[in-house]
Image: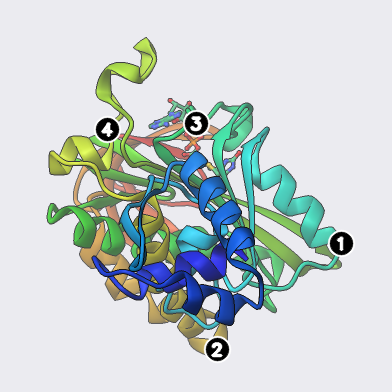
């Protein structure tokens, strides 16, 4: 009901919607409409009520509720079903549970705050309230297990494009899962998989974006390595707009990837947005550190590094230090 009311108000930007029109559209009394308007005001929506004119939406709060995201979302798969929590341990953990219970492909799980946000290899992801996008998408691609990690690379291309568009400043991909603005991390991706007999059952694609996190709010250890979109652009960006931009960039790339193109069809786009190739790097792998020049990425998303002794190594998984 509140979603319908909000939708009607948003369709008249700056203008009034009469109480009568709302009653008719929602099939309830004027008193019921008024109660819902009160609840929306309590949730932070600034709604003006004027006798004989009706209601006018003056300002929306910066929320990542289903209603805020859905209105204006131009996708046909991603985010068609949205599960919102104000506070949650980790959206990836919740998405895993929902996926096991049969949630459809494209389901978006999103929270205002995470109390136990996760990075890769058991690391923590700082996820304060009211200022970030902490979300997970459930995907069900027909993929062999060995290719699942490529989804992170496909997503990174979408993220770099979306964040560049939103800020007007070029965002760069650090292989495999970081999006940086001028060496500082603004977004991280965590892909987790549920598989059987070498076939992927589902993937949970976790995306964390610092949108309006004030720089001084980052903990000490992140001060010099993290940034937010607001920090880059200089003004806050509505978080729901960030979510829509990401999903609208990701959907066509994901379709191209799963509809037979594979990573080979994304590789050139990845290269255009990357800031990894051509650099001297240290790749911290499970086998130990590998130092050399990041030469290229192959059609499977594997990073090729020329070691100091001239040998070329294939890196399948690592943390990269510039
Ligand atoms: C990542 O791991 O970058 C993956 C982050 C994925 C987070 C999303 S949020 C929604 C979903 N639900 C979850 O529980 N997780 C996903 P990794 O490459 O391991 O990087 C982790 C490292 O990044 C940490 O050790 C810190 O150094 C740094 N870090 C932590 N929080 C950060 C933040 N908010 N911004 C920038 N850097 C951060």
Sequence-wise, which precedes: disc 2 or disc 1? Answer: 1
Q: Which quadrant would the N terminus be assigned to in this image?
A: bottom right
Residue furthest to the top? 220
The one of 180 and 9 positioned closer to us in this rendering: 9
Q: Which residue is mark 3?
A: 127
* C-beta proximity under 8 Å, tags 1 and 3: no
From the image, state whether disc 4 or disc 3 is nearer to you.
3
Q: Which residue is mark 2?
A: 259
| Beta carbon of the mark 3 residue lies under 8 A of ligand 1 | yes
| Beta carbon of the mark 4 residue lies under 8 A of ligand 1 | yes
Sequence-wise, which precedes: disc 1 or disc 3? Answer: 1
Q: Quadrant of residue 91?
A: top right
| Element assignment for label 1 | loop
Give percent across and percent down for residue 14: 24, 65
The one of 47 and 162 positioned closer to us in this rendering: 47
Q: Which residue is mark 4?
A: 227
**Residue 182 visible, this angle:** no
Q: Which residue is mark 1?
A: 101
């Amino acid at each position: 009901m509140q979603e319908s009311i909000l939708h009607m108000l948003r369709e008249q930007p700056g203008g009034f919607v009469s109480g009568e029109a709302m009653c008719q559209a929602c099939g309830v009394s004027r008193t019921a409409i008024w109660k819902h308007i009160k609840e929306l005001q309590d949730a932070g929506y600034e709604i003006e009520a004027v006798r004989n004119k009706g209601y006018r939406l003056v300002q929306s709060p910066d929320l990542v509720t289903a209603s805020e995201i859905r209105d204006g979302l131009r996708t046909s798969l991603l985010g068609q079903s949205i599960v919102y929590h104000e506070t949650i341990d980790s959206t990836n953990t919740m998405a895993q549970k929902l996926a096991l219970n049969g949630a459809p492909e494209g389901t978006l799980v999103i929270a205002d705050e995470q109390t136990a946000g996760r990075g890769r290899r058991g690391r923590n992801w700082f996820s304060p309230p009211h200022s970030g996008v902490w979300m997970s998408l459930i995907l069900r691609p027909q993929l062999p297990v060995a290719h699942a990690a490529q989804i992170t690379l496909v997503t990174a291309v979408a993220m770099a494009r979306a964040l560049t568009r939103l800020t007007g400043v070029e965002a760069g991909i650090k292989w495999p899962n970081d999006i940086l603005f001028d060496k500082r991390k603004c977004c991280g991706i965590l892909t987790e998989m549920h598989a059987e007999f070498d076939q992927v059952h589902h993937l949970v694609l976790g995306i964390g974006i610092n949108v309006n996190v004030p720089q001084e709010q980052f903990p000490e250890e992140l001060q010099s390595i993290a940034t937010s979109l607001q920090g880059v652009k200089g003004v806050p960006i509505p978080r729901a707009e960030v979510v829509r931009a990401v999903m609208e960039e990701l959907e066509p790339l994901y379709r191209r990837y799963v509809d037979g193109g594979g990573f080979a069809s994304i590789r050139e786009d990845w290269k255009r947005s990357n800031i990894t190739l051509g650099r001297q790097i240290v790749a911290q792998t499970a086998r130990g550190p590998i130092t050399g020049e990041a030469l290229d990425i192959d059609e499977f998303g594997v990073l090729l590094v020329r070691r100091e002794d001239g040998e070329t190594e294939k890196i399948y998984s690592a943390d990269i230090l510039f």
